Structure formats: structure tokens, C-alpha cells
Amino acid sequence: MAKYVAAVDQGTTSTRCMLFDHGGGVVSAHQLEHEQIYPKAGWVEHDPLEIWARTQDVIKGALEKAGAQAGDIAAVGITNQRETTVVWNPKTGKPYYNAIVWQDTRTDKICNALAKDGGQDRFRPKVGLPLATYFSGPKVKWILENVGGVRAAAEKGEAVFGNIDTWVIWWLTGGPNGGSHVTDVTNASRTMLMNLKTLDWDPEILEIMGIPRNMLPRIVPSSDPNTWGNTPADGPFGDSIPVCGDLGDQQAALVGQTCYSAGEAKNTYGTGCFMLMNTGTEIVPSKSGLLTTLGYKMGDKPAVYALEGSIAITGALVQWLRDNLNFFDDSPMVEEFAKEVEDSGGIYFVPAFSGLFAPYWQSDARGAIVGMTRYINKYHISRAALEATAYQTREVLDAMNKDSGVQLKALKVDGGMVYNETLMQFQSDILGVPVVRPKVAETTALGAAYAAGLAVGFWGNLEDLRENWLVDATWDPAMEMGTRKELYQGWLKAVKRTMGWVEQE
């Protein structure tokens, strides 16, 4: 009898496999990093074959740690770094080019050219997204135009596209030997190619971008009782398990945080920061710089939509202090540094390394530290780096309140940075609402497990999942309103200083 559900969580910097029991508790986890490749300024790549190798290793590691066999696992769910784009040969499994990562800005000229007719919001009414380097469609277009032989291969059916979820599912279900070429509605909604209403690829946009439809995966529900295939006996699980759950990482966290009612929201603190608010079965167009996206689709039930605020650089800023400036050896040490000083000394650190994401969507912005004086030291800079995460979240929350008309009463948080008490307190202070961390903070993997487990009846319904959600810690605002307002005004002023840095051709 199956006791667990497995989740493969393929993130920007690492891959892990986690096993969950019926109560949503973590049974085991195994995680491995993969290489970040920076060929040019603004370019970020991953090796897809390295990611698949790491995926196999973490699966075996998680099984080993739990002393589990394939027969103990009811189903497999996938969650992934959403917009990262792979094009490969389905006969050989060989990629034509490295995966182009969501943070990569090389498609800025493509986006600018597409925006000449209809502006940055040209496709927004259909896809809920602005024209930005972030999304997969322009990345596919770049590969088709810049990698020799790919367009000809695509027309012959010898080049297929997928975000990383599609790549991993294809390999997990057999790869060149009959692997399933699918993506779920949440990942499809990050390509700029899927129509939000029809939940299908939009023929007009495909034509404008010059992307052959036969390259694209079949769009499926996030939790699918019509499973997409089973893991092969010679695969990393060592036997046959249905693969039937797939969610982009942020949508997976929405499901893992049990935000199943309209108006419920979560914020995930990882490489970047991503806030999602459930808007129910209604498509809410954003007038405040947010994205309209799919929240999830469970089997044949109606799709649930969400508003999303995407912030490119949060945890990655701490990594930058660690790796590029050698401030400290381990990322968690940033909190010790931040606590050495009472405040940031009047400085603000705006980490627009890849431009500004929500709510501005300005790819010509670049990072800046403003307000510098001779007094400032590495402790102030470390504190300002943490505070930047909280300020950026406040900007997104303000936009969300405006678009949805719902005032958020509390923010559910998850991800690696939520164990930083200093940050969580400042986050609550600058928002003016309680910040709540659940018992299982790794809700991304949990959401993927939930989607897969629901598909095979391991869990009965969403209410079963709500019962699993437990509070671990709550931070309440302790800052005076006047101070909050003053600090935030300073931040908005700092953000303006970063805009228009790169001259547009």
C-alpha cells in the first residue's frame, strides 16, 4: 500500500526530491545544486542534461533516506522554475542549446520589436502578461532565430519546446522511448503563448512570433487523473509510478499554502520573490503592473486564476553579497550582519540586476545603492539587502490590493528566507499586517505532491489539504505608522534612481 507522494522540485539554483506522508509531513528530502552559466552580461543559462542528471540523483537520494521503494509511492508531482526554456530533439533527448533561464534578458530587442505594434501590453488582454524578457515565448523565438538548424528541425518535428517541467516529465515518463510531451495550465500561462480564456495555444500569437505549433507540448490540468505516463523500471524510481501533478513553482506554493479561496495570498521568498493572490474562477486584468496568471486546475474542475507580483532579485541579492563581494561564507549569516546595526544607516539597495519586474516592468533599470555616506559599512549594506526584499513585497501588495479590491489581512509566507526572523519582522512592519509561516515552509514541493496525490485519490479533496496546514510562527507589525510611511517613501525615491540606465536602441 502506498504511503507517500513524491515531489520533484526543480528550482533555479538546485533540484530536490521530497517525500510527503498523508498528513503533508516531510518524510525525506535530497537536494543538489547545478551550475549557473553566464556567457554574457544579462545572459543566464542552465545545462538541461545536468538538471536531468541531478533530478535522477535527488530521487534516488530521497528514496534511500526514507528507506522507501517505488511501491511505497502513490504518485509523482513536478514543480519547476517556470519560464526557463529548453528546445530539444525528441528522438535523441539532446538539447539544441542550453536552457535559457527566466532571469535572462537577451530577448529585450525581440520584446521591443514586438512592442512597436501595440506597445508593451500588446498581448496582455489574451495572455495576462506584458511583453518582457521574463517569459518563454520570446526565448523560443530567440533560439529559432539564433541557433543554426533549429527552425528546420522544428518544421520536421525534430525540435520540441518545453519549460523545465515539460523537460523533466518527458524524461520521467520514458524520454526518447515514448516520454509524454505535456505542460500544465500554470506553466503554459507563463509562455505568453496561451490564451487565458481557452487554455490553449493562441494561433495568432504563434504566427506573430513565428513559433511552429507542433513544437509545443499538450496543455493538461495541474492535477490530472488521466495520468501522463508512468516512470519506467529502469528510471530513477526503479519501477512504475504514475506522473500526474505539475505546477509552476509559485502556483505550487499557492496550492501548498492551501490558498483555495478568492482573496487568499502567499509570498514565496527564494531567488526572487513571488506573491500570488487567488482570484477564483474570474480572470482579473491588472491595471497596476501585476500579471494575470493561472492559479491551478484540478482535474475537470474549472480553472482557478491568480494575480501575481514577480520580483526578480531577493535571495539572489544575499547570494551576490556572499559570492561576488565575499561578505560572508554562508547566506544565513546575512542576518547576523544585519543585526550588528540598528538600521540601514539611511541607504537603500535596489537590486534591479535584471531590470525591474513587478509592478514596473522596466528592463532598462539596473541595480543601485543610494544614500551612501562615509558612515556606511558592510553591516548596513547587508541590512539594506534584506530590507529590499520587504520593500519590493510591499510594492506588489499595494498593487494587488488596488487590482483586486481586497485588503489583505495577513500574508502567508514560505521559502528559504522565512527563517530569517529579522527579515520577517521588518516585512510585517513595512506591510502593516501579520506575517504567518506554516509548519511546512517548503510549500512549493508540497503543492506539487498535493496535485499528484489528488489525481490518484491519495487525498480526497481540497478540504483534506486545508486540515494539514498548521501555523509555525506569526510576526505582528510593531512599527509606528509615520516611520513606516517615511521609510517606504525613501524606497520609492531610490527605485526611481535606477530607471532608464540602459539606453534603448
Image (cartoon, rainbow, N blue to C red):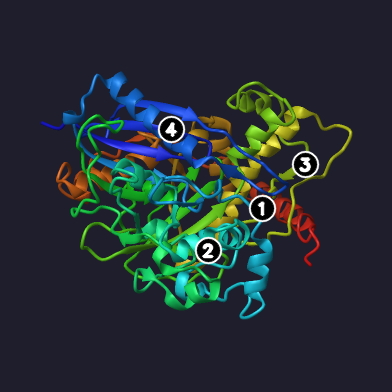
2 or 1: mark nearer the eye? 2
Depth check, front residue: 352 or 115: 115
| Distance in Å between CA atoms under marks 2 and 3 | 49 Å
What is the distance, in whole Å, between disc 4 and disc 3 at their CAs?
43 Å
2 or 3: mark nearer the eye: 2
User: Tag 4's secondary structure?
Assistant: helix
Residue 347: numbered disc: 3
Q: Amino acid at mark 4?
A: Ala
Decide which of tag 4 and tag 3 comes sooner along the chain. 4
The picture places residue 440, in percent across and down from the top left corner, at 35, 34
Say whether marks 4 and 2 touch (CB < 8 Å): no
Residue 189's mark?
Answer: none
Say whether disc 2 or disc 1 marks the residue closer to the N-terminus.
Answer: 2
Q: Earlier in the sequence, mark 1 or mark 3?
A: 3
Query: Mark 2 packing: few (<14 Cα in 10 Å), some, or many (20+)?
Result: many
- To which residue does mark 4 refer? 53
Q: Nearer the viewer, mark 1 or mark 4?
A: 4
Is the C-beta separation of discs 2 and 1 under 8 Å? no
Q: Where does label 1 land, which residue?
A: 485
> Residue type at mark 2?
Arg
Q: Which tag is nearer the camera, tag 4 or tag 2?
A: 2
Task: Name the secondary structure under disc 1.
Answer: helix
Q: Residues within 10 Å of mark 4 (few under 14, many from 20)?
A: few
